[in-house]
Amino acid sequence: MIDIQVTDLSIGFEVGKKILDGLSFQVDQGERVGLLGRNGAGKTTLFKILTGELLPDEGEARTAPGKGVGLISQIPVYPPEYTVEDVLNTAFDHLRAMEKEMEELAGKMGEGDKATLARYDTLAALFERQGGYETETNLNKVCNGLDIPPTMRSQLFSELSGGEKTRVNLARLILRETEILLLDEPTNHLDLHATEWLEEYLSRYKGTVLAISHDRWFLDKVVQRCVEIHDGKAELYSGNYSFYVEEKERRYLEKLKQYEKEQAKIEQLQEAADKMRLWAFMGNDKLYKRAINMERRMERMQTTDRPTKERKLTMGFGEKEFRGDEVLTVKDLGMGFEGRALFSGVDLEVAGGERIALLGDNGTGKSTFVKLLLGELEPTQGKLRFGPTVRIGYLPQLVTFDHPERNLVDTLLWDLNCTPQEARDTLAAFNFRGEDVFKEVGDLSGGERSRLKLCELMHQKINLLILDEPTNHLDVDSRDWIEEAVRAYEGNLLFVSHDRYFINEFAQRVWMLEDRHITDFRGTYQDFLDFQERKKVYARNAAAGRPVGAAPLGGPSPEKKDKPKRPGGTKELEKQVAAAERAVAKAEEKQYELTLRADEVSDNYLELQKVYEQQRELEEEIAHLYTAWEKLAAELEEMKQP
């Protein structure tokens, strides 16, 4: 069954210029589809047509009749006295109406009317099937997942920030259990915890999803196929975002090969026709006719348009030479506001060339930590010190300019002290071309201001680059540009980001800010995720009174198969399990000793690096020991079963 049908859809807001021009595709029931395209390609316009907010010039876009549609980008207006709890409870309006009718029917049951009894039974079954008796449980579960605490639930909805309203509206739509979800940048105002919860929810969601998102990790985790809007038309890709990237490159190379083959053939025919015309001047009319026929054949040839790729970034950061090992030292750092501590007792050491991701939920103090580094705030305790040759470049989350009335060219002329041609070339490298360069800075979107700030940063001599949510507001192509620049940059990098694709690409070290403390993890983002998962398993096992490294409770049980008996039987296997447990315990003791050793040599960078390397090797060894122990323990448990 088709849930979303788009057929020959066209719409334009300027005479002679169409945003959507013959767009056609469909989404079947239960599919999860990503809608891709550059900013301004018409993605949000399509959503507005699907919800009836706009009417197309031609064609149609419709959803399956009788199915509820939820749109994340639109936040309904509620009465001013509505609290967040009131807004969330509107998701259960249909259940409340059903409950009220059941109460009225219950009052009439004494009359013995069979129709009344039948109607009550029908409603009762429907009420239970739609979760009427579990509304409070479901409400608490969704609020916990999307970080909507009790204090927020008691606030007036009208007093929330835009991001908080979006989060509450997302929760309301999830509780409504609509059959079709239209998601317009659903992760923009979610922290990592809430985003992961949403991904898990969507993986179990039985309805249909059409999602606009620049979050590439989210697209990889959630969508099954992609639709890209390019030049007003749909290009279809039967896989997630990673598949889309590879397939798009393959199609480009295939078209380029076809184009070059056709051009070579045309050049060959043209050369032959020119020779025949030359010989025809010598009196050979047959050759002249052949030349004319050959040229007509060239005109009739269906040639492929030369394929184009999005323009890549052609400039990089101007780096200042770094001397010495010390970049940043943080000692017993603490910060708080009005008696509330954000973090305390933070000790960190950063050496040359490191790339660090500062992660944590919203409100934990990531931006405050960055402001301390930039000297915009003073800590409540402790201190931090930069190396003498460190020069910082900073891209804030919300970019502002001192003179918003200046146009883009004048802004670069003043800020970079460059020539008009240099300013135009720099702007062109960041896709500011034509009349766009004469826009006033104050009229730019958030993403455009970020790009303009990057233009300026790349002309500065820096060796420590601090980025606060660098990919926010940027479309996928713009994110590719900044990633190219960061990839080529060889200095130190410290960044705050919710973009897991970006984090996974660049983080070689993770600082996780949680519970008023920074956990310093040396490794990639994927290593960190694996580490977090191991911690959860250990915690569950410890709570259940099982050995720390035991297999997780509730996991898949071994299949009942006849296996060859192990030599030595159960007793021998018990000895091997005990030996594996002793090996794990010994390795964990050594791990504790290395932790003490790290504290002892914390002032000696070279010795500390040796300890960190030993810790990293020991973590891998412990992981292998746990795997061996789990396998032996599972075999022993199976052998003991009757």
Image (spheres, rainbow, N blue to C red):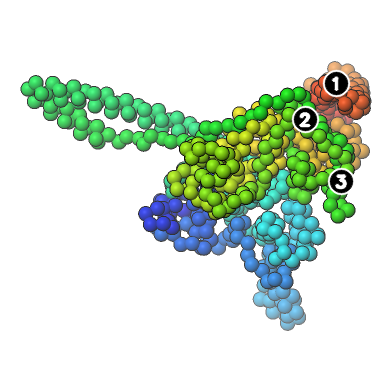
**Position of 125 relative to 438 (above/below):** below
Amino acid at pointer 1: Glu
In the rendered image, which residue does mark 3 sit on?
380
Estimate the spatial distance between the alpha carbons at disc 2 and disc 1, rounded to whole Å. Answer: 19 Å
**Front label number (3 vs 1):** 3
The front one of 143 and 401 is 401
* Local crowd size for mark 2, using a 10 Å CA cut-off: few (<14), some (14–19), many (≥20): some
In the rendered image, which residue does mark 2 sit on?
387
Q: Residue at x 33, y 29 (%)?
A: 262
In the rendered image, which residue does mark 1 sit on?
607
Residue 397: x and y in percent read 67, 46
Q: Secondary structure at mark 1?
A: helix
Q: Is residue 359 visible?
A: no
Q: Is residue 579 visible?
A: yes
Left or right: where does residue 333 sit relative to residue 425? right
Amino acid at pointer 2: Gly
Residue 272: x and y in percent read 21, 23
Who comes first in sequence, dot 2 or dot 1?
A: 2
Estimate the spatial distance between the alpha carbons at disc 3 and disc 1, rounded to whole Å. Answer: 31 Å
In which quadrant of the rendered image does the C terminus lie?
A: top right
Q: Residue at x 58, y 47 (%)?
A: 449
- State the mark number for residue 72: none
Who comes first in sequence, dot 2 or dot 3?
A: 3
Residue 118: x and y in percent read 68, 72
Estimate the spatial distance between the alpha carbons at disc 2 and disc 3, rounded to whole Å. Answer: 22 Å
Who comes first in sequence, dot 3 or dot 1?
A: 3
